[in-house]
Image: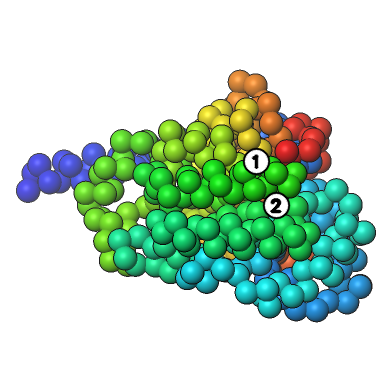
Amino acid sequence: MRWTAWAAAYALGLAAITVSGAFVWWQREPRAPGTEVNALWARHQWVGEPHTDAEYRAFAGLLKRNRITDVYFHAGPFEADGTVPPAKYRYAKQLLGAVREYAPGVRAQAYLGQIRTVEGHGVTDLDDPAVRARVLGSDAALLDAGFDGIHYDFEPIYPDDTAFLALMDATRALTRSRGRLLSVALEQPTLFDALQPVYKALVPRHGPVHYPPRPTREFLLRIADRADQVAIMTYDVSLPTKALAGWHFARHTRWTLELIGDRTTVFMGVPTYRPLVPWAEDLAVALRGIRRGVDDLERPPKRPFGVGVYADWTTDDAEWARYRAEWPAGTAAAGAAR
């Protein structure tokens, strides 16, 4: 009992020191400005339903006001066999014409994904070459429709997923042959690569429950060498205080930009929906944390970087105003995200 009490007291003391240290660290105002290269995940209705000219104009104005350069328009998801029925994006032509007219320079990418089959559970089996071939056929059809790129969001993707890497290779060949973009959304990387075997041992990867699909350093480098843009889904922090959540965003920003910021454009994902711990994680905390992470860089990355707002269907006018306040315009990392 005595040792149990000592262990509990030690753990509580360590937690108190961590929380206090994070609170002190969090007080300093970030120096880094926002960037001129930013992304937005957009709802399926933009390609699946008709809109008025006034609605297209208003959306284009929102993109320009908030310095959004890349929009991932949900055009899927993939069917189990890797296809996307054209009826799902029947209004893409009207949308893309409006974007080019009212928001020239903004890249409209087809946002495509599905639950990736793992150990027999899921929807789309990327291990099947025939499925991957049909995915590529769907990609080609969407590029033919006028999209500026393909944005993948398959989940879960583990760092030993050679089939996904093969799909990335084939898709890169397709998009580059058309002069278009390939982008991908990934989960936030591991804090320590050595934790992956621990997760795998504690939560075996079978059935509907999986251990966290966190990219390792090596896997993220391999993805960055294949993609024009990598969006890190940094949200859903599940930490109990604003300071700890902010530290999470800062740490992942610095680590990711130092690792792949010279190889590809990076977008750090920020939430505008109600997160798992709403009193600690919100848009303002995420943006402030990312700016603190940029502050900690020894030098800016060679490629452009910014934030990815998730998502347009959860962001109201008040949140966009908060975004502009917490991600103020600056000249850092401006440029074309190619």
Q: Can the viewer see residue 167?
A: yes
Tell me which amino acid carries mark 1: Asp
Residue nearest the observer in this picture, 155 or 67:
155
Residue nearest the observer in this picture, 208 or 82:
82
- Side (left or right) of 300 relative to 119: right
Q: Residues within 10 Å of mark 1 (few under 14, many from 20)?
A: many
Q: Residue at x 31, y 40 (%)?
A: 195
Q: How many marks?
A: 2
Image quadrant in which you'd find residue 317: bottom right
- Per the rendering, the mark at residue 228 is 1
Q: Residue furthest left?
A: 1
Q: Check the image and report above or below for 51 versus 230.
A: below
Residue picked out by circle 2: 149
Q: Position of residue 220 (x, y in %)?
A: 49, 38
Badge 2 marks a residue whose secondary structure is strand
- Side (left or right) of 281 relative to 155: right
Residue nearest the observer in this picture, 66 or 50:
50
Could you give the CA–CA distance between mark 2 and mark 1, rounded to whole angstroms? 10 Å
Name the image quarter holding the C terminus: top right
- Side (left or right) of 276 relative to 88: left
Q: Residues within 10 Å of mark 2 (few under 14, many from 20)?
A: many
Q: Residue at x 82, y 56 (%)?
A: 63
Q: Check the image and report above or below for 167 versus 141.
A: above
Q: Residue at x 79, y 35 (%)?
A: 335
Is the C-beta separation of discs 2 and 1 under 8 Å? yes
- Side (left or right) of 216 relative to 76: left
Q: Can the viewer see residue 155?
A: no
Badge 1 marks a residue whose secondary structure is loop
Q: Position of residue 10 (x, y in %)?
A: 23, 39
Q: Position of residue 281 (x, y in %)?
A: 54, 54
Tell me which amino acid carries mark 2: Gly
